Image (cartoon, rainbow, N blue to C red):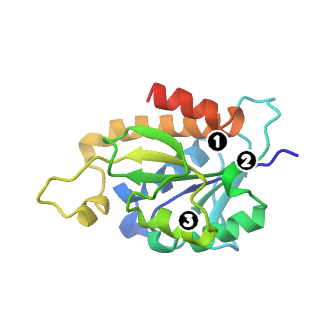
């Protein structure tokens, strides 16, 4: 029997962190939910969830659960594990985590499955709480800070006004990638995105 997907966008809660580079995952989920004419609703797992169908009207697609977490980044694994259990998701097959990535140029997108966390506290918490690193990730590049800037300050800073057009384009492409993952499968989406980022 086919399973629906759980797609989680990482970030920190609250106005203080809204729109920051570290909240790239939140931005993608919010953008996708908004473009679908839906809204996120509070969920008992300590998150905000929207369940909808992606793809062309008439497609026999399963519902996808889109979520942002109410916890801070370094405790992302706790509500993630609750969501996985609540929706009966096999993380190795149908969990996709969206996160910012310092090792990619700004606004580049890449899909990967498994591997290390690259120093990302949100991914580390998820891997620890799920007991596995074998889940899919959509990495959104945020580039590297100036050599004199603290990386922690950089990831918690907002995207500059001059980068808003590039950010909007990246969010659109990220939403397309998520849609392709849940409708066409991870492997096909990965080949298309990573070949034509």
> CB of mark 2 within 8 Å of CB of mark 1?
yes
SS of the residue at dot 3? Answer: helix
Between tags 3 and 2, which lies in front?
Answer: 3
Residue lying at 62% horizontally and 68% vertically, measured from the top left: 131
- Which quadrant of the view contains residue 48? bottom right
Sequence-first tag of 2 and 1: 1
Residue lying at 72% horizontally and 29% vertically, measured from the top left: 56
**Which labelled disc corresponds to residue 36?**
1
Residue lying at 64% horizontally and 42% vertically, measured from the top left: 36
Between tags 2 and 1, which lies in front?
Answer: 2
Nearest to the observer: residue 71 or residue 137:
137
Left or right: 142, with 48 as reference point: left
For label 3, the residue is: 127
For label 2, the residue is: 52
Graded by Cα atoms within 10 Å as few (under 14), some (14 to 19) or many (20 or more), the crowding at tag 2 reads: some
In x, y percent, where is residue 125?
A: 51, 70
Sequence-first tag of 3 and 2: 2
Q: CA distance from mark 2 to mark 1?
A: 8 Å
Give the vertical position of 185 relative to 34 (above or below): above
> CB of mark 3 within 8 Å of CB of mark 2?
no
Nearest to the observer: residue 97 or residue 53:
97
In x, y percent, where is residue 144?
A: 24, 50
Quick one: which residue is furthest to the right in this view? Answer: 1
Residue lying at 73% horizontally and 56% vertically, measured from the top left: 90
Between tags 1 and 3, which lies in front?
Answer: 3
- Which quadrant of the view contains residue 155? bottom left
Give the vertical position of 52 relative to 122 (above or below): above
Left or right: 69, with 119 as reference point: right
SS of the residue at dot 2? Answer: strand
In x, y percent, where is residue 138?
A: 51, 46
């Amino acid at each position: 029997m086919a399973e629906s997907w759980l797609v989680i966008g990482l970030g920190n809660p609250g106005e203080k962190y809204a729109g920051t580079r570290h909240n790239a995952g939140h931005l993608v989920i919010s953008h996708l939910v908004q473009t679908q004419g839906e809204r996120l609703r509070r969920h008992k797992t300590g998150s905000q969830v929207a369940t909808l169908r992606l793809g062309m009207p008439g497609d026999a697609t399963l519902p996808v659960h889109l979520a942002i977490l109410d916890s801070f980044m370094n405790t992302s694994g706790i509500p993630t594990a609750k969501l996985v259990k609540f929706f009966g998701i096999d993380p190795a097959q149908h969990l996709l985590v969206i996160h910012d990535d310092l090792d990619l140029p700004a606004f580049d997108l890449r899909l990967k499955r498994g591997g290390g966390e690259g120093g990302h506290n949100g991914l580390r918490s998820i891997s620890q709480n799920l007991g596995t690193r074998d889940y899919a990730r959509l990495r959104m590049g945020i580039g590297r800070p100036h050599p004199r800037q603290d990386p922690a300050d950089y990831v918690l800073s907002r995207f500059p006004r001059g980068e808003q057009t590039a950010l909007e384009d990246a969010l659109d492409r990220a939403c397309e990638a998520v849609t392709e993952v849940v409708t066409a499968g991870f492997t096909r989406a990965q080949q298309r995105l990573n070949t034509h980022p």
